[in-house]
């Protein structure tokens, strides 16, 4: 096979829809319209450039405004607060299509919608909502979410970032680590301990003296997404920037529930892209005088991939139905995030094998998805933390403390 001719070369996206169990029949017209519009956008704006940006380790920042235009920021938040006014399944299918393009692109949308707009919408004052949400929804402002610290990742309750009272301001000190979009962000939703040691959310704005957001370099994963720290050295934050309606870890964890839900759908997109590429390659690549798709071992890989994708699609769809009724529990969301991300990572590895040596190159998407999914397996709660959440839910016994 002439790999050069067959390759994406100009990065033409040959993705085809795969729906083995006719799950499209479970979606309504709005879901399908949203899904198809985002798919077309990914084909025209993401696929042609993503390998290049990933290879260079650069975030395609020009896509923020476009993500806003296609309704990727807060699809299920109310329209008057900058959201899309759609349901949770629409939010899910949009995340699936974005992650079909790249997990980093889905991250740009997850953080903005679920981790920045959502807490301001849910826990903010009306003044804060009106001040920030329209600008975030339109992509005029970029936001980030600061929970993780250098010494407190899986256990955010141990955080040491804190603030002291100072008249009509508070004084914030501490640092956050691994923060998606932080070097670009106009605002950061930061979780810190108040003088009583209870966790509260604050909106910290770029340019506040003592606030900096240095970039973290050297990532082999999520290379098209920018990640940084947040450093607070006696930052004076007006009290009017404190989110008034929540105190305690349930504040940030509620936001994580929203984002983890989106990842449960998003990971299916990455898996579908790998499966699609592997299936096509298996029909085109000839060895021993036959397409490699004719060998039983290749068929086993492909059959298991589409089986696992189908199971993950059903899990996500059912979770979406529960979420639409306000009945999806955090533990149910953990199960879907964990299962679907692991499924996608396994499929990326199998798909890479089907592509042989070509699978390690940027001619095909599998290695990029595989590297990205190593982050997705870890952020928003690691694979093992989600297992322990399920374990706690079914036994009633807490393994954490
Ligand atoms: P625990 O005592 O279990 O809970 C404290 C309070 O929170 C409530 N809660 C939740 N509420 C909403 N959604 C959830 N998922 C919730 N989980 C717990 C809980 O009911 C309780 O409420 P209340 O009223 O009793 O106070 O807390 P714990 O300290 O024992 O921690 C439990 C544990 C380990 C599960 C939790 O700390 C955890 O989930 N750790 C993982 C940390 C994590 O996921 N970090 C993610 C950082 S953000 C990120 O990765 C963004 S990536 C963005 C991108 O680029 O896409
Ligand atoms: P640790 O918590 O130190 O865990 C290390 C290992 O120990 C893991 O395998 C874990 O499963 C295991 N472990 C920990 N506790 C237990 C236990 N009780 N039982 C069994 N095993 C355990 N955070 C944000 O706040 N905002 C962001 O925007 C953000 N974006 C990110 C982007 C990227 C690219 C990455 C890599 C991370 C991002 N994170 C973000 C941080 C992410 O959420 C954390 O990395 C994650 O929660 C794990 O924390 P940690 O890295 O400190 O690992």
Image (spheres, rainbow, N blue to C red):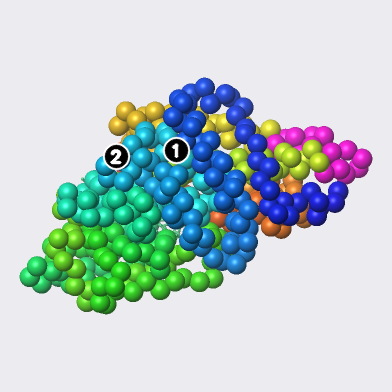
Could you say where residue 230 lies in the image, as x and y percent from the top left?
Answer: 34, 69
Q: Is residue 267 above or below residue 191?
A: above
Please state the extent of the stretch shown in magenta in the rendering.
285-302
Front residue of 263/188: it is 188
If you read the primary sequence from the N terminus, does the residue marked by circle 1 or circle 2 appear first? 2
Give the image quarter of residue 181. Answer: bottom left
Could you say where residue 255 lies in the image, as x and y percent from the top left?
Answer: 32, 48
Q: How many residues crowd mark 2 within 10 Å: few (<14), some (14–19), many (20+)?
A: some
The residue carrying mark 2 has its beta carbon less than 8 Å from ligand 1: no
Front residue of 244/295: it is 244
Q: Quadrant of ligand 2?
A: bottom left
The mark found on residue 92 in the picture is 1
In the rendered structure, the answer to whether residue 35 lies left or right of residue 332 reads right
Mark yes or no: residue 229 visible: yes
Q: Which residue is mark 2?
A: 78
Magenta highlight on residue 239 = no
Residue that sits furthest to the left in the current view: 167
């Amino acid at each position: 096979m002439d790999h050069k001719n067959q390759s994406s070369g100009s990065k033409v996206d040959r993705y085809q829809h795969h729906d083995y169990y006719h799950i499209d029949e479970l979606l309504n017209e709005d879901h399908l319209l949203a899904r198809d519009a985002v798919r077309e956008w990914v084909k025209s704006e993401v696929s042609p450039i993503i390998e290049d940006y990933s290879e260079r380790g650069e975030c395609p920042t020009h896509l923020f405004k476009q993500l806003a235009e296609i309704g990727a920021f807060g699809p299920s938040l109310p329209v008057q607060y900058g959201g899309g006014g759609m349901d949770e399944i629409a939010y899910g299918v949009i995340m699936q299509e974005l992650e079909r393009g790249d997990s980093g692109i889905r991250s740009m949308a997850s953080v903005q919608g679920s981790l920045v707009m959502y807490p301001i919408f849910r826990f903010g004052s009306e003044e804060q909502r009106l001040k920030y949400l329209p600008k975030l929804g339109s992509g005029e402002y970029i936001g980030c979410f600061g929970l993780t610290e250098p010494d407190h990742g899986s256990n955010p309750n141990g955080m040491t970032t804190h603030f002291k009272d100072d008249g009509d301001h508070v004084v914030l000190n501490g640092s956050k680590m691994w923060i998606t979009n932080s070097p670009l962000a106009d605002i950061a939703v930061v979780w810190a301990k108040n003088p009583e040691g209870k966790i509260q959310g604050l909106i910290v704005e770029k340019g506040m003296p003592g606030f900096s957001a240095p970039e973290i370099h050297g990532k082999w994963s999520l290379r098209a997404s920018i990640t940084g720290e947040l450093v607070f050295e006696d930052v004076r934050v007006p009290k009017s920037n404190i989110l008034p309606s929540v105190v305690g870890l349930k504040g940030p964890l509620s936001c994580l529930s929203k984002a983890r839900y989106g990842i449960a759908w998003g990971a299916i997109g990455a898996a579908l892209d790998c499966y699609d590429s592997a299936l096509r390659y298996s029909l085109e690549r000839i060895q021993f005088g036959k397409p490699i798709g004719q060998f039983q071992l290749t068929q086993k890989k492909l059959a298991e991939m589409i089986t696992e994708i189908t199971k993950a699609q059903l899990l996500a769809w059912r979770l979406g139905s529960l979420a639409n009724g306000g009945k999806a529990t955090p533990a149910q969301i953990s199960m879907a995030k964990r299962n679907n991300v692991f499924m996608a990572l396994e499929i990326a590895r199998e798909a890479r094998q089907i592509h042989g040596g070509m699978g390690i190159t940027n001619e095909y998407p599998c290695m990029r998805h595989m590297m990205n999914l190593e982050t997705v397996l870890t952020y928003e709660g690691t694979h093992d933390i989600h297992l322990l959440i399920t374990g706690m839910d079914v036994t009633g016994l807490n393994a954490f403390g």
